[in-house]
Amino acid sequence: MLRRALLDWNPSGTGASYARIADMSDRLSAVDASFLYLEDYTTPMHVGGVAVFRRPRTGFDYDKVLALIDRRLGLVPRYRQRVMQIPGGLVRPVWVDDQDFDITYHVRRSALPKPGNDDQLHDLAARLMSRKLDPTRPLWEIYLVEGLSKNRVAVITKTHQAMVDGIGAIDIGQVILDVERNRQVPDADELWMPRPEPSLAELVVEAMTDAVQRPGEVVENVRAAVVDATATVQKITRALGGVASALRTAVVPAPSGPLNAPTSTQRRFAVARAKLDDFRAVRQAHGSTVNDVVLAVVTGALRNWLLSRGEVVSPSTTLRAMVPVSVRSDDVEARPTYPETGSLPVGSVGSKVSAYLVDLPVGEGNPIVRLHQVSHAMRAHAESGQSVAAGALVKVSGFAPPTLHALGARVANQFSDRLFNVLVTNVPGPQVPLYAAGARMMEMFPVVPLAKNQSLSVGVTSYDGGVYFGLNADRDAMPDVDVLAAMIGEAVDEMIGTVDA
């Protein structure tokens, strides 16, 4: 019983449109609920981002950010809802309006000692990402970080994977950005009032009704709540698509190594930067794709990192990466477009993500050969005719990297940790400046969560001529993640050197 009211809004001018969805309280999908079941203190199930802005002359303070988000929450009603559990776990939880919603709890203020540097910002991001979100409140937080040097401020976002499905709810970081410096957003039509919360008795009656209509589902929910949630997750993996292609790629467990250590409760975060034109030059010189070049750069950096640790690296050594790729939905052509933009609602492409497992040739010392091997491995997926080209993805989805990174992480968390060593999500963004409350976004680093027994995830976003790598790592297993980040820069330089070779 979902009542949907669509409000067209085009913030980026590149074809993005947000759907305003007024939902009655509704039940979490099996996939969404699985992230609640699997979450513990070593594997919080939220995705995030670290965006760095240039402070404008008009200022960029907490009150401005709070007002901006408050005006736009009507576009994502899920952000005023919390999860309500059903007594006994007979059926999946439901989304209900938070009767005591307090936006100042979710939009927070932090500061670094002036003049704050990038390392301090990354340490703060790591600490914030290590903490679980409060399950009794709407599952998101935003931090305005002041005190950065060179007249900069940062915004750190956290959004639970149970919320981000790419259609009904997108990442909050996607909502606050505009292509225009001073874009005006109309105030909400009316003051938001929470709908009455269902009583426990009503929920029990509804659960009993569902038990009669769908007895098999009740068995699965009880098993998830009482015995082992992993069994449920394995049975719903196919809901996200791409499982068959992934399993064809890897019928044996991934190689063992330092990237699959037991996961601790704390994280480290490091970043790397590059120029998109350099990746394009390598692509043109060697007949690959930008995504291939990104994966080859990550491969080269991982090779050097393993060697720096004294690991044995032979010519045949590989590491298996899970590479989520946006694919075409079967019903894309049937979906409505908006007359003034001809675009699809955000998430109509990004909401279908296929998992692809790629053996990265870290044993190969020649960067050109590494690139060709990666391109060959990725070509099978491209030739399926289902993958979405980067340009088309940007045109359809606007600035959707935060949401698409979240969807990629959702896919990865459905797989056994024995199938891959590292998650690499690469999402193209628009090559024009974006703004929040008049402040220009200079950089955007994704923070992709770790799965159980995973020590590293790499998120990559291209934006306004730059390529931004965010490395989220287990604090105990990878105290040298900053070394790996520096080696990404070295691997980029190595690839650039092949253009004229």
Image (cartoon, grey):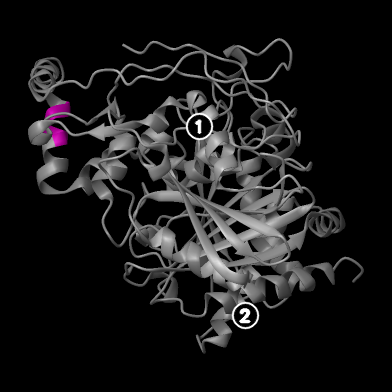
Q: Is residue 322 magenta?
A: no
Q: Quadrant of the N terminus?
A: top left
How crowded pointer 1 is (Cα within 10 Å; few <14, some 14-19, many 20+) is rated as: some
Image coordinates of residue 201 in percent, x first then y, are: 7, 21
| Magenta part, dominant SS | helix
| Image position of 298 (left or right of 268) | right
User: SS of the residue at dot 2?
Assistant: helix
Q: Contact (CB < 8 A) between labels 2 and 1?
A: no
Residue appearing at x 14%, y 42% in the figure: 225
Q: Is residue 411 above or below residue 445?
A: above
Image coordinates of residue 393 in percent, x first then y, are: 67, 34
Q: Is residue 418 above or below residue 498?
A: above
User: SS of the residue at dot 1?
Assistant: helix
| Image position of 433 (left or right of 196) | right
The mark nearer the N terminus, 2 or 1, is 1
Residue appearing at x 33%, y 54% in the figure: 132
**Residues rendered magenta in the picture:** 217-221
| Occupied quadrant, residue 236 | top left
Q: Nearer the viewer, residue 74 or 114?
A: 114
Residue appearing at x 61%, y 71% in the figure: 114
Image coordinates of residue 343 in percent, x first then y, are: 68, 20
| Image position of 278 (left or right of 389) | right
Report if residue 215 is visible in the image.
yes
| Occupied quadrant, residue 13 | top right
Q: Is residue 14 above or below residue 408?
A: above
Mark 1: amino acid: Asp
Mark 2: amino acid: Asn
Say how many tags the image has.
Answer: 2
Quickly name the residue at label 2: 304
How crowded pointer 2 is (Cα within 10 Å; few <14, some 14-19, many 20+) is rated as: many
Q: Nearer the viewer, residue 27 or 176?
A: 176
Report if residue 234 is visible in the image.
no
